[in-house]
Image (cartoon, rainbow, N blue to C red):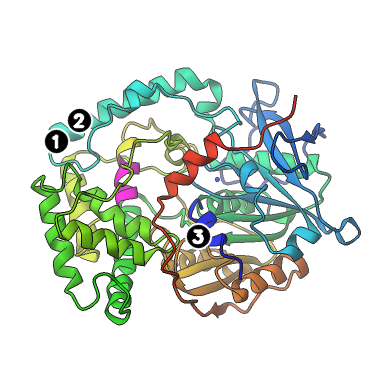
Amino acid sequence: MRKTGPLLAAALAVLVGLTAFTPAQAAEPRATTIEWAACAWPREKYECGTLTVPVDWKDPAGPTVDLFLSRQRAADPAARIGSLLVNPGGPGLSGATFATFDFFSPEVRRRFDIVGFDVRGTADSNRVLCSADLIAQYPDTFIENQAELDHWRDFSSRARADCKSRTGPVFEHLDSVSVAHDMDALRAALGEEKVTYYGISYGTVIGQAYAEQFPHRIRAMALDSVVDHSADGERYFRDTAAHVQDVFDAFVKWCAGETRCALHGKDVRAIWARLKDRAERGELGGMSKAQVLRIIFNGSYAPAWYSAAEQIARLDASAPPAPLRAPGDIHFPWQLFCADFDMRIRDYHEYAWQLRRAKAVAPDMEFNPSTLTINSWCLSEPRPIPYPQHRLRVRGAPPILLVNSRHDPITGRAWAVSVARQLGRAARLLTYEGVGHGVYDRSDCTISTIDRYLIALKPPAYRASCPAVPLEPSTQVRAPQDFLLQDLTDRPTPRH
């Protein structure tokens, strides 16, 4: 098994008059050509290009946005099946960069052109731009009273206005339905009759939107680490707390049985409670409770539990805090999420109620730190939300493969089960019986099962599973946001 996948996975979302939930039954999008050229990238086998699409698909004659693309050609043209469109999630990670990684198996790369596109509002596709000085002023994401909630609401409103003014018209059209129409335009421009798609994490929201809009244009769709777009704000908050509590429970059990764990033989839950209390008293060098929680949250992506245990042990010994990235100190394209999920709350009473509900299902973790951040940034989103939460409405699609780890810190398996139920007979669910976010290359079993579906259109049985593989002590904790930072500074660009 290749070893790069879990880290990459950590990084790891039409026609006039269509409503958000009405499948597109019309003719092909107007033909558009893509001018491909060699990327300015160390290896010459990649091509880059742009595709021009309407900012507003209900106004095709209006302003446009250029989507940045990359393509890795099929290694064996004679055996080529078509194009595999890919998205690594985020939201905000670059699909164009992801497509240049040798992420997929040699057989997939032999049979498909791997095509990635930067979703509108990200990377080189009219990226959301904001004042760095303003964003640096963001308040603590843990809100403790109505005054702090009012302050956050005012701040998020000012941030939204600033980002909108710097980004332009596309800012109001970043929802996943718009992205699904972009993807269908890309399919047509590539000359493909049907889409073959692989999306991780937030890329599964894009896949679900495409399946609703264009069910008859799907050849194969693999959704890895599934987001449940039917979860309203309260359930999203509670569910994601349960997901991160689940990985904490699994971490405690693993450490009890692994002699190389830095906390082996100790009361991990008691140490954890002590660290949270010290953070609240300001005894961890300015490290907040949310940042403490991120040790487990971030450490369960790869997963990197040996390293996470060492961080916890150092903190408990009163050593200087391990370096962590605070949950808002990056250029995070939060508007993509806010356009798809209504996370607004009325007042602090409702916020505190959500916290209590979350703590009831997550006594050790209390809340999911990523969700706490999202809640804050979306507080001032105006009504209506472009693509609000709802149960999937997919009719006439071929089998769609859903893939999830048994223990995932953000997109728990329960979400994949829920989406499978919504899809009904179209769904196939593959469970990786281990820990982590992003499943594809966790093992030979996951690779071969997903490959067989993408290449030969042979999905597994509904309740198929792949056994977990042993964790590696050398794996380091890396936050999913770290990949976004690297992605925005180290990426392929067209050669001029």
What residue sits 57% from the left and 69% below the top? 424
Q: Secondary structure at mark 1?
A: helix
Position of 274 compared to 108: left or right? left
Instruction: Write down the region rendered in magenta.
Output: 368-375
Give x and y (percent) for residue 332: 43, 36
Q: x%, y% of residue 25?
A: 73, 46
Queried whether the magenta region covers residue 371, the answer comes back as yes
Q: Main secondary structure of the magenta part?
A: helix
Q: Which residue is mark 3?
A: 226
First of labels 3, 2 by sequence position: 2
Magenta segment: does it hold 256? no
Residue 343 place in picture, x, y as percent: 34, 43
Q: Is residue 333 visible?
A: yes
Is 88 placed left or right of 111 in the picture?
left
Residue 258 left/right relative to 16: left
Q: List x then y, in percent, for residue 69.
A: 69, 38
The mark found on residue 150 in the picture is 2
Secondary structure beneath dot 3 equals: loop
Disc 3 to disc 2, C-alpha distance: 33 Å
Q: Residues within 10 Å of mark 1 (few under 14, many from 20)?
A: some
**Residue 118's image quarter?**
top right
Judging by the rendered image, the residue that carries numbered circle 1 is 146
Structural distance between the alpha carbons of marks 3 and 1: 34 Å
Quadrant occupied by the N terminus: bottom right
Q: Amino acid at mark 1?
A: Gln
Q: Residue at x 60, y 31 (%)?
A: 124
Give the number of the disc on residue 380: none
Amino acid beneath label 3? Val
Contact flag, marks 1 and 2 (Cβ < 8 Å): yes
Q: CA distance from mark 1 to mark 2?
A: 6 Å
Looking at the image, the residue that sits furthest to the top is: 165
The image quarter containing residue 314 is: bottom left
